[in-house]
Amino acid sequence: MRVRLPSAPIDLRATIITCCGVEQHFSRPFGDYLPGAFCCVFNRFAFTFGKANVEIRPYLGFWEFRASCFWHITNNLRATKIVLAANVFSRYVNCNNELFMANILSLEKQTAVIHALAEGNSIRSIERMTGIHRDTIMRLGVKIGEQCAAIMDKHMRNLECRLLQLDEIWGFVGKKQKNATAAERRDGKGDVWTFVAIDATTKMVPCFLVGQRDGYTADCFVEDLASRLNARPQISTDGLSAYVDAIERGFGCNADYGQIVKEYGSEEIQEQRRYSPPKLVRIHKSVIAGNPDEDLISTSYIERQNLTMRMHMRRLTRLTNAFSKKRENFRAAVGLHFAYYNFVRIHKSLRMTPAMAGGVTDHVWTVKDLIEGAK
């Protein structure tokens, strides 16, 4: 595509384009300025940006842009925007013939967006509140969420968690499992389960894992949990059979393990109350391994944590159209939630963050600290 050159010289040698932390410096020679309509002509040059091979060269008074990926051009009265390689390369020429970069969110705006996401706001509601485009919000959330998972992995080490509760929470990506075809399931659509562990004393979540509700995911989750602990824990789970083998493989004889199974009544519920929880009939506790204290075999805290997840993650809200469309976006959202929960959000009963109660950090993090730590 060709764009008419402006009528005034533009010195591009100081221009820097940043994408995903990678800087592209325009340090090549740009030739001499020519009179009239051909005043801003520079020598042909090419570079690789992301997955795109971009070439820029003069052509009869035009800038000719070529890229190996998708690109488009938008014109309005004040500026011409050239977007190359699926928005990884952009440049503006404004009405004053000055070259400037595409808008990059300030730290304050990033903080506002991440704070709203972590508190359970939907992407479109954040767009309405901040004026930031939903695609920008999505990209920022995924980027920070992935880095938050790395922060969790780095800091949640050598923990003294002695009373753990494990559970898994259901969600879905794209569509529910029963509505997804075999090809869509291979593509990541359908049901998704998040395995979560919580320390009943400090309310800290040492690790999580997004996957399927099967033995393989349970094995990976428990092995990761065991690698983060220094103490011998007492573990409580529900009756999922995959936990028995997983805990034996992950902890061996270095854990006391008990299961609790709750039975609910099957009485008919009126239509207006069909989402109300059924009546609890009885509770069965059983010792599986070691010597756990039966009075402490419980999943109450982890079940309350499941509610916290659904309240603070719009993707997990019941009866919503805000569900995740991509599995990687779901993982990033879970990573953001648990980093915010552990390091930023003050627990009401503890009067400090779970990470402080667990000895992982000595101060309350802010959302800005979370963003800067994710860079």
Image: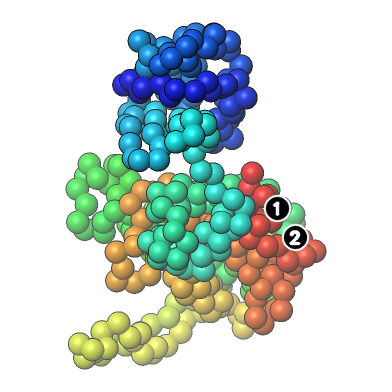
Q: Secondary structure at mark 1?
A: helix
Q: Looking at the rendering, in which quadrant would you find the N terminus?
A: top left
Q: Residue at x 30, y 42 (%)?
A: 187
- The amino acid sitting under disc 1 is His
Q: Is residue 184 above or below residue 5?
A: below
Residue at numbered disc 2? 360
- Residue type pointed to by label 2: Val
Residue placed furthest toward the right: 362
Is the residue 220 above or below the residue 122 in the image?
Answer: above
Q: Position of residue 208 (x, y in %)?
A: 54, 57
Give percent across and percent down for residue 226: 64, 54
The reply, left or right, for residue 348 in relation to residue 301 is right
Spatial CA span between label 2 and label 1: 7 Å
Left or right: 330 in relation to 184: right
Q: Position of residue 17 (x, y in %)?
A: 55, 30
| SS state under label 2 | loop
Q: Earlier in the sequence, mark 2 or mark 1?
A: 1
Which is more toward the observer, 313 or 296?
A: 313
Q: Quadrant of the C terminus?
A: top right
Residue at 37% of width from left, 61% of height from top?
124
Q: Which mark is residue 155?
A: 1
